[in-house]
Amino acid sequence: MAEMQDDAPERERRGRYELRGSDDGTLLECHDSPGITARVDPGLGFSEAEARKLGTRVILLDGAGQFGPLYDNEQQLYNLDHHRGCVRSITLSTCEQAMLLVVQGLPLDDADWTVIASTPDLDTLLSLWVLLNHRRIGTLPDASRDVLLPLLRMEGAIDANGAELARYCGLPDAVRLEAEARLVRLQGRLRELSEQALEPSELTVAMLIEIDRTVFGGDTLPTLPAVEHSYGHVDLGDGQVAVVCRDGSGIYAVEPRLKERWGQRLGMIALENAPGQYTLRRISVLKPLNLERAYERLNLVDPAVDGRPPEKCWGGSDDIGGSPRPGGSALGARSLLATLRELYDPAAMGTGRGRALRAGVVVGLLTLLAIVASALVSSSLIAPPVARAALELGTLSAVLWLGARLLVVLASRSRSYMFGLRRPAHGWPRALLLTPVLAALAWLGAGWMPPLSAQPPPDVRQVLEILGAIVLAQVAVETAFRGMAHGFLLFSGPISDPRSRWRLSRATLLSSLLFAALTFALSGLWLQAPALPLPGIAAGAALVAGLILGLLRERTGSIWPGALVQALAASGAAAAHVLAP
């Protein structure tokens, strides 16, 4: 998601209509109806049970729903069909059903809608045109209305009953003959385009433009003000959206243009003024949108915000702000759109409890794997206790570090810096002042050190082996807990960063509790200092150390200061344990 300056999503603008690629295939949009997205694919066909799984505000056109006509106002699911589950000769065609939905006040402007079509025949194309142009229906000039309504009535009569019975559709002869002639021209154009082997979405756009010409004649259509490029929009809940776009004219010039298109639904604008330069603007006065949440999240995901200096970050007031200055953001516009969707879209927001559970399960299983690997190594090794202890701890640490590092790579989607694998922020050496405190806690929390009962006392080489294993253990612990577990929990609430006040974040608290729980379990297996009431003291010491290291990780943006301090502290504590009489 946080790739460097990414290109604009593939879009092709043709008059008022636009095609863009997506994971679901090619999508079609109309500038007059920015909240409606259409998919045209002959391979699409849904049963009623499958259609209900598509979500709310879905309209299926003429065959896309392989079941009878459906008008479910509660789920806002509509199947405009006149083939299955109905008496075809007395059921309105799809295009006429679409017109009835529009004139009866279907709230197409109140939220995002999806229109799904399969075969782009003339009935389907007229239906789609009516839905995409619903804003214009009520204000059509007399001449255009006198073309459109007979066109729909005549197509509906032909599609339902055939050309012979269509003459009894109720239209005066002169009007009917004109409508028939227009339909013949449209059918001829549709055949020409079909022979060109166009993609269904491309054929649909070409035919929508042809219908524009038919309905509006030679008149120049009044178009809504546009921006240079729209990357998409994000649902903010309560029917409001945040629009991410690019335009060089500035936020106050873009704002009225977007208001013309979106009306009261416009809640926020994210404007790309130039590559890496963004302005965030809160529009809504009714919905209490908090831009501070956006600043906090963007400061987490933007690799350009590295605490060097701390002032280089997203920020601003509660109604307008922007990207870091100088230098700008390393996020592309699509990454910005995805970040806002994760933050604000009710459908995309996960729960902190679920993330905490996943983090606990992952780290717990990884630690169990490391323990099993170290036990297998030590059980198959014939060596003095000190050498066996060093190899056992080294194996555990290596498995834990490699596993955590692999999981970070897989989970980060090229955002390993969000898991603390980055240069620390400016001023990190002050963290070394914590070494004495953490050394005392490490001495108490000896659960991560295997038992040593060697006689005679270990020599210098053996002590160095133990210290090397201890240092590796601290790097592995920091990667697993302050890196992976903390990273999984990073979005569960506000954190303490170089620019904010000190706070105990949910990510720090939960990762520290997880660290303490696993230390408790380990200290029950490996009692380095039997005279102490481990594992209780070890777990308590690990909890306090975890809170300190979590704060340090958030203030520096990196796990490496904590790993260094822990390595120094744990080495001193381990030396004290190993050399104690």
Image: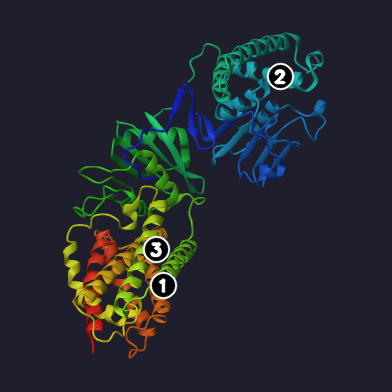
Q: On the rendered image, what quadrant is the N terminus found in? A: top left
Q: Which residue is mark 1?
A: 380
Q: Nearer the viewer, mark 2 or mark 3?
A: 3
Say whether residue 109 is visible. Answer: yes
What number is the disc on residue 155? Answer: 2
The residue shown at (36%, 75%) is: 382
Q: Are marks 2 and 3 in contact (CB under 8 Å)?
A: no
Q: Amino acid at mark 2?
A: Glu
The residue shown at (22%, 50%) is: 312
Which badge, 1 or 3, comes first in the chain's sequence? Answer: 1
Q: Amino acid at mark 3?
A: Ala
What number is the disc on residue 485? Answer: 3
Classify mark 1: helix, strand or loop.
loop
Q: Quadrant of residue 466?
A: bottom left
Q: CA distance from mark 2 to mark 3?
A: 61 Å
Q: Nearer the viewer, mark 1 or mark 3?
A: 1
315 or 135: which is nearer to us? 315
User: Pointer 1: residues within 10 angstroms few (<14), some, or many (20+)?
Assistant: few
